[in-house]
Image (tube, grey):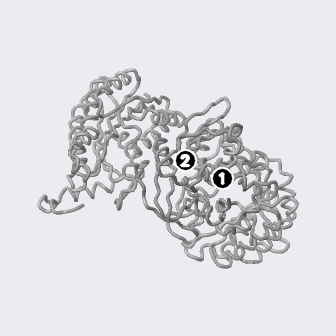
């Protein structure tokens, strides 16, 4: 296999890696690399922190293994290579009346990455996590491809789904698509006055897709104000989405300064009329709102940004409110704050979801932001919550391990599959996930 | 009328991008290459992306016995028949210098193999009286350079062949395009150092399809390679022979 030395970063661009990367285009090449020179697989590098980095080591770029191998139009069962992007699948299958069962906030996520992080989407409360829809995947092992199903290889399945790539590269996966009622999405947007109003609205929403957007700069009686979006797929006529725009350079420091963010958030909140509204959108506009702006991460400037995402149990909603309060008080404006009700669905030992509320916030990199995120992490621990490793760049091992009760089961299977620790990534080393025996 | 592309060397990076784009335009693909299991995967993928016809067939530039079955299969395909040739191999010049027999394989892969196949297919194309032949050469064929002149020589031979084929097939309504890509981000170039103006395979693929629609004779892709090669071609040999580019 040919290796190329590259510098690469996670989506947040705070953490960087330099190392050799191979980019196989066929299964035989991946098989040869895995048996002779095993290295962790990476996809579109949409993890924010260091889950997709292997500094001073090697990585396998899976993005050119991206073919749709089979599809059954009766059942919706699809078999795709791991480098296939979820947004691509949406584009190909919506005209046929199907859509991926679970879609994270960006369509650039690969299926392999979606499995390794057991990603969730705006339908998590009803549909569960991505891994729960996977009926089979093929893992590339030293001895060649190995087909894994949740029934026949329960522990290997659970160690791979949400397993941070530590069982080896995924070659392909099978999962069942969902029926789409049409090629558009009907979104009901509702203005929410404050935190107290938000949670019951999320709890009582019976929409297939729902997500809350929070103005994390609002304080006092407006604390936690935002917009609730509930959506269903539908048929009808709508103009296609405009072509993508690119952020050409790193934005200057003031682009997302507190004042700009505060003003933007207030305007954004007011764009939804007081009595709410229903709009029809192209389907990808709703699921992947930021994908139209390619490289939007550059808006945070050269030094990058952190994303913090936690989930806390329902009974600990108060703790989440305190977090929002703390963020609002900090003035470290976070233009993109997302609040969502999660169901219990998760498919792997190290999967993120738990029944409760999840909150995701962006912070431009700064010492103050890093201090704040550490406090938020402590509050998550105290609330028996969990940090999402796909987003994490600052977590501390002593906090993280306790959040994942099935960690030991994961470790056991991972060490069996990869005794030489060839698939370790920067995140795994930083959080000392494979140090224990 | 529906169009079907016979894609020769279909597992190559640019060919894959081309097959996918042709499929999305609703055109059929007959995928010819060596690695049958890969070809089957590409065929399946093209089918889901809009190709009304997607099939794999064996082709090896060094095995002329594999050519006739392609002609047979092509005969059975109705509508417009077009051919896109992506085969070629590029061993390091140093490897060739150490093992001169590599010259033969390089020229077979990049020139005589595909030329043999195209000559075999030509009467069928003439009979149909329409369609396109897109032959992928290289900017390396415009001038023999220190770094890869055997590869360059085989591509130069292929360019001359395509020019003649254009002259011949044009008389019966079949259009021939000579495609000269610059450096492309493919499995072949992955890991090579300091490549100038590297293009994505999707760009080359869409340029070829556009050239087919507009009946262009010779294209450089990306277009920046036209001025670059115009300059390089105009350097007098007595200066060029001392240069390392």
- Residue A379: image tag: none
Is A205 placed left or right of B38 in the picture? right
Q: CA distance from mark 2 to mark 1?
A: 17 Å
- Residue at horizontal 58 percent and vertical 76 percent from the top: A253
Identify the secondary structure beneath mark 1: loop
Q: Nearer the viewer, mark 2 or mark 1?
A: 1
Residue that mark 2 sits on:
A83
Figure quadrant of residue A76: top right
Identify the image quadrant of residue A320: bottom right
Q: Assess disc 1: are there few (<14), some (14-19) or many (≥20) residues with their C-alpha within 10 Å of its C-alpha.
A: many
Query: In the figure, B170 relative to A268: above or below?
Result: above
The x and y percentages for residue A74 are 66, 29
Image location (x, y in percent) of residue A59: 51, 56
2 or 1: tag closer to the N-terminus: 2
| Nearest the eye: A317 or B108 | B108
Residue B161 is drawn in which quadrant? top left
- Relative to A320, is B16 on the left or the right? left
Mark 2 neighbour density, 10 Å: few (under 14) some (14–19) many (20 or more): many
Host chain of mark 2: A
B202 versus B228 height, above or below: above
- Residue B105: horizontal and vertical position, in percent? 26, 40
């Amino acid at each position: 296999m040919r290796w190329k030395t590259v510098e690469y970063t996670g989506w947040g661009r705070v953490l960087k890696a330099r190392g050799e990367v191979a980019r196989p285009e066929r299964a035989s090449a991946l098989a040869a690399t895995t048996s002779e020179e095993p290295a962790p697989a990476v996809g579109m590098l949409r993890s924010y922190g260091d889950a997709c980095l292997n500094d001073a080591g090697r990585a396998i770029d899976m993005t050119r293994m991206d073919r749709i191998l089979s599809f059954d139009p009766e059942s919706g069962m699809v078999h795709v290579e791991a480098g296939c992007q979820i947004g691509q699948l949406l584009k190909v299958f919506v005209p046929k009346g199907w859509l991926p069962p679970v879609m994270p906030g960006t369509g650039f996520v690969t299926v392999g990455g979606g499995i390794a992080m057991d990603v969730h989407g705006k339908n998590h409360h009803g549909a569960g996590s991505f891994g729960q829809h996977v009926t089979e995947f093929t893992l590339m092992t030293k001895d060649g491809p190995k087909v894994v199903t949740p029934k026949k290889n329960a522990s290997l399945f659970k160690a791979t789904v949400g397993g941070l790539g530590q069982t080896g590269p995924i070659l392909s996966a099978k999962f069942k698509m969902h029926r789409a009622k049409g090629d558009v999405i009907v979104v009901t947007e509702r203005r929410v006055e404050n935190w107290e109003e938000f949670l019951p609205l999320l709890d009582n929403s019976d929409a297939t897709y729902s997500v809350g957007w929070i103005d994390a700069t609002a304080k006092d009686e407006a604390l936690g104000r935002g917009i609730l979006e509930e959506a269903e797929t539908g048929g009808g006529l709508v103009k296609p989405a405009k072509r993508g725009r690119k952020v050409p350079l790193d934005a200057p420091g003031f682009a997302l300064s507190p004042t700009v963010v505060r003003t933007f958030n207030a305007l954004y909140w007011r764009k939804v009329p007081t009595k709410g509204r229903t709009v029809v959108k192209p389907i990808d506009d709703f699921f992947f709102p930021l994908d139209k702006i390619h490289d939007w991460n550059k808006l945070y400037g050269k030094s990058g940004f952190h994303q913090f995402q936690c989930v806390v149990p329902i009974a600990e909603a108060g703790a989440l409110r305190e977090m929002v309060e703390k963020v609002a008080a900090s003035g470290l404006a976070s233009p993109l704050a997302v609040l969502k009700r999660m169901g219990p669905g998760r498919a792997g030992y190290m999967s993120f979801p738990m029944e409760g509320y999840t909150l995701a916030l962006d912070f431009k990199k700064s010492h103050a932001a890093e201090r704040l995120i550490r406090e938020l992490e402590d509050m998550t621990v105290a609330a028996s919550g969990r940090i999402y490793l796909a987003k994490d760049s600052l977590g501390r091992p002593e906090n993280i391990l306790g959040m994942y009760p099935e960690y030991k089961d994961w470790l056991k299977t991972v060490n069996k599959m990869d005794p030489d620790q060839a698939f370790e990534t920067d995140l795994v080393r930083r959080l000392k996930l494979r140090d224990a025996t | 009328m529906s169009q079907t592309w016979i894609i020769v060397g279909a597992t190559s990076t640019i060919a894959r991008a081309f097959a996918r784009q042709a499929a999305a335009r609703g055109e059929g693909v007959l995928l010819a290459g060596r690695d049958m299991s890969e070809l089957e995967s590409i065929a399946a993928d093209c089918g889901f992306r809009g190709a009304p016809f997607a099939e794999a067939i064996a082709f090896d530039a060094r095995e002329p016995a594999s050519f006739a079955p392609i002609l047979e299969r092509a005969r059975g395909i109705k509508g417009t028949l077009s051919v896109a040739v992506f085969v070629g191999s590029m061993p390091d010049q140093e490897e060739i210098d150490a093992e001169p027999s590599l010259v033969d394989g390089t020229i077979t892969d990049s020139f005589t193999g595909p030329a043999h196949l195209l000559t075999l297919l030509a009467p069928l194309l003439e009979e149909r009286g329409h369609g396109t032949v897109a032959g992928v050469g290289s900017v390396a064929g415009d001038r023999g350079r220190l770094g890869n002149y055997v590869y360059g020589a085989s591509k130069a031979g292929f360019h001359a062949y395509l020019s003649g084929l254009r002259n011949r097939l044009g008389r019966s309504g079949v259009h021939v395009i000579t495609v000269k890509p610059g450096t492309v981000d493919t499995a072949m170039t992955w890991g090579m150092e300091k490549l100038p103006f590297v293009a994505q395979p999707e760009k080359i693929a869409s340029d070829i399809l556009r050239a087919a629609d507009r009946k262009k004779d010779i294209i450089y892709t990306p277009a920046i390679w036209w001025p670059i090669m115009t300059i390089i071609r105009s350097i007098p040999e007595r200066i060029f022979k001392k240069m390392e580019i």
